[in-house]
Amino acid sequence: MESGFRKRILKKAFEKNSRIILAFDDHDEDDALGKLNTLCESLREHLTGVKIGLPTMLSAGLNGLRMMINRFKDEYVFIADVKMADISYVNSVTARLLYEAGFDAVVSHGFIGYEGGLDGLFRETGRLARGVIIVVSMSHVGSREFIDPGVEKLVQVALTYGADGVVAPATRTQIVEKVKKMAENSLLIMTPGVGVQGAPYGAGLSAGADFEIIGRSITGSPNPVEKALEVRRQHGRILAQRAC
Ligand code: BMP
C-alpha cells in the first residue's frame, strides 16, 4: 500500500512536473533561514521537495525551521536529513521532534539494524503518519569501505519494514540500477551526487531513480531559477527516453 508521504511527494512531483529535491545545507554566516525563504519563494514551481541538512538545523534551530516549514508546507515536502544512526530511544525522540516541527520525512542510516535501532524511528513514523527514507549507499568514494558491501541487505531492510524511499548515489549508477531491480516501485529512489559532486544532471533518473537531490549547484548559483530550469530540461529529455 502506498504511504501518505509517498502519495504526497508523487502528487507534488506530478503537479510541478519536477524531479528535483533541493538539498539545503547553508549555515548562519550566510543568513541561512533568510536564504532558504528566498529560495523557497523563487523556486516554488521548480522543486518538489526541500531536504534540510544538519548545518542548517544546527544554526537556524528547530523553531526557526518550524515557522519556515509552516509557511511553505503546501508548496513542498520537507525532509529532515539527520542521517540517523543511534539507539531506538534516541531515534524515536529525534524523530518526534523533527515531525513535530513539521518535517514530512526523516532520513536514517539503515546499517544500525531494526531491533533496538530503526524500530524507534518506525514507531514514531507510524504514530504520526510520516515518512522514512533509508540510506543504502552514499555518493562519496568511502561508501565502498563499509556501506556498499551491505547494499542488498539495506534495501531488504527498507522493503521489509515499509520505508518510503531510499538514498542511493548518482555517482555510482550501477548501484541505483541494482536498487531499482530489487525494489521495483515499492521504494522511491532519491539520488544525490549530481552537479558539484561530479555526476551529470539526470544520471540518477537515467538509472531508474525517482528524484535527484541537488544542493550547491542550485543554492550556490548566481541564478538559482535558471539553474533549476537547466536541470529540469535535462530531466525532461531523460524522462522522455525512459517512457519509450
Ligand atoms: P550537493 O548537491 O551540494 O553536493 O548536495 C548533496 C546533498 O545530498 C547534501 O545535502 C548531502 O548531505 C546529501 N547526500 C549526499 O551528498 N550523498 C549521499 O550519499 C547522501 C546524501 O544525503
Image: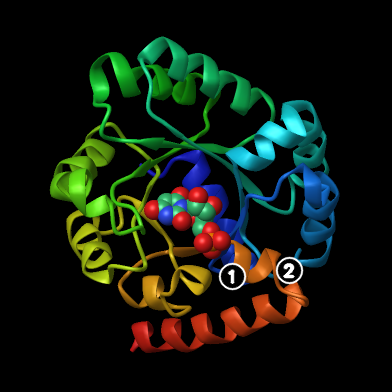
Residue type at the position of mark 1: Ser
Q: Which of the image's four quarters has the N terminus?
A: top left
- Neighbourhood count class around disc 2 (C-alpha, 10 Å): few under 14, some 14–19, many 20 upward: some
Q: Of 158 and 90, which appears nearest the observer? A: 90
Q: Are marks 1 and 2 in contact (CB under 8 Å)?
A: yes
Q: Quadrant of residue 189?
A: bottom left
Vertical relation: 135 (above or below) 93: below
Q: Which of the image's four quarters has the C terminus?
A: bottom left
Instruction: Identify which residue is drawn at 51% across, 42% down.
Output: 5
Q: Of 227 and 5, which appears nearest the observer? A: 227
Number of dots carrying numbers = 2
Question: Residue 13 at what x, y percent from top left?
Answer: 57, 63
Question: Residue 95 at what x, y percent from top left?
Answer: 52, 23
Element type at mark 1: loop
Vertical relation: 115 (above or below) 144: above
Q: Which residue is mark 1?
A: 18
Q: Is residue 40 left or right of residue 235?
A: right
Q: Of 190 and 84, which appears nearest the observer? A: 84
Q: Quadrant of residue 147?
A: top left
Element type at mark 2: loop
Res. 214 in view: no
- Neighbourhood count class around disc 1 (C-alpha, 10 Å): few under 14, some 14–19, many 20 upward: many
Instruction: Identify which residue is drawn at 52% across, 14% down.
Output: 93
Q: Which residue is mark 2?
A: 45
Instruction: Identify which residue is drawn at 15% across, 44% down.
Output: 150
Res. 17 in view: yes
Vertical relation: 126 (above or below) 159: above
